[in-house]
Amino acid sequence: MNVILFGPPAAGKGTQAKRLVEARGLVQLSTGDMLRAAIAAGTPLGRTVEALIQRGDLVSDEIVTALVEESLPAAEAGGGAIFDGFPRTLPQAIALDGIISRRRSHIHRVLQLKVDNDVLLDRVSKRFAESGRPDDNPVSFKVRLEIYDRQTAPLLTYYGRSGKLMEIDGMASVDAVGASIRRALVS
Ligand code: ADP
């Protein structure tokens, strides 16, 4: 089973993806984690994307699509992929459809974590204080939210047409959100 976790930055996609890894044996494909690993390892890719990520801008569609295409076979062999933070633009969604259909595979569900902006801002300012993730600073976070509204949220129309989209209340407790996701995956 392949699942897309969809939602604004700091909606809880990573937290819930990790729970699905534990509970369902799925494999998390987080483009953000992959890019941060490249930065930490000092690879050429990491050096290319570091400043841009810190500002809150998007990495190019070609780069993130290649990362996903490379890791999808192992994820599907491992039980299925949870796409976390991908796709974020219409070209990424179209590319993912191509990759998936060439593999004669499917996206089973697109789960939209809904969280109000004031809650997101509150969460991320706490996360910034704790983890110091550079792109969680208030200026970059504002850029990330604007990019989400402009480039990512429109994908809801795209996935809405597929009949696979389900809304999840992302403002409930972590356990309650996890329970809603489990229910969505069996329905
Ligand atoms: P969050 O979900 O908290 O916004 P991520 O860890 O998913 O954060 O992503 C962090 C940053 O990595 C993004 O702001 C962006 O710069 C880059 N990135 C991650 N995934 C993508 C993607 N699919 N397309 C373009 N850039 C991406």
Image (spheres, grey):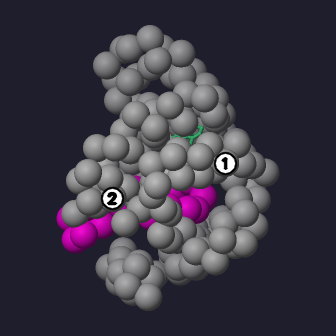
The residue at the point 60 percent across, 74 percent down is: 165
* 149, 45: nearer the viewer: 45
Q: Looking at the picture, does residue 67 appear above or below residue 89?
A: above
The CA span between labels 1 and 2 is 19 Å
Residue shown at 44%/83% (left/top)?
184
Which quadrant of the figure contains the N terminus? bottom left
Q: Is residue 130 left or right of residue 6?
A: left
Mark 1 in CB contact with mark 2 (< 8 angstroms):
no
Residue 25 is situated, as x and y percent measured from the top left of the image, at 22, 63
Judging by the rendered image, the residue that carries numbered circle 1 is: 94
In what quadrant does ligand 1 lie? top right
- Mark 2 secondary-structure assignment: loop
Which stretch did the figure color magenta? 3-24
Please tell me which residue lies in front, 3 or 34.
3
Residue 95: percent from the left, percent from the top? 62, 43
Q: Residue at x 37, y 55 (%)?
A: 81
Q: Identify the image quadrant of residue 131.
A: top left
Q: Tell me which numbered mark, 1 or 2, is placed earlier along the sequence.
A: 2
Please name the amino acid that badge 1 sits on.
Ile
Q: Is residue 16 magenta?
A: yes
Quick one: label 1, few (<14), some, or many (20+) residues within 10 Å? few
Q: Which residue is mark 2?
A: 80
Identify the residue shown where x is 54% and y is 68%: 110
Residue 167: image x %, image y %? Answer: 58, 79
Instruction: Look at the picture and state if 110 lies above or below 66.
Output: below
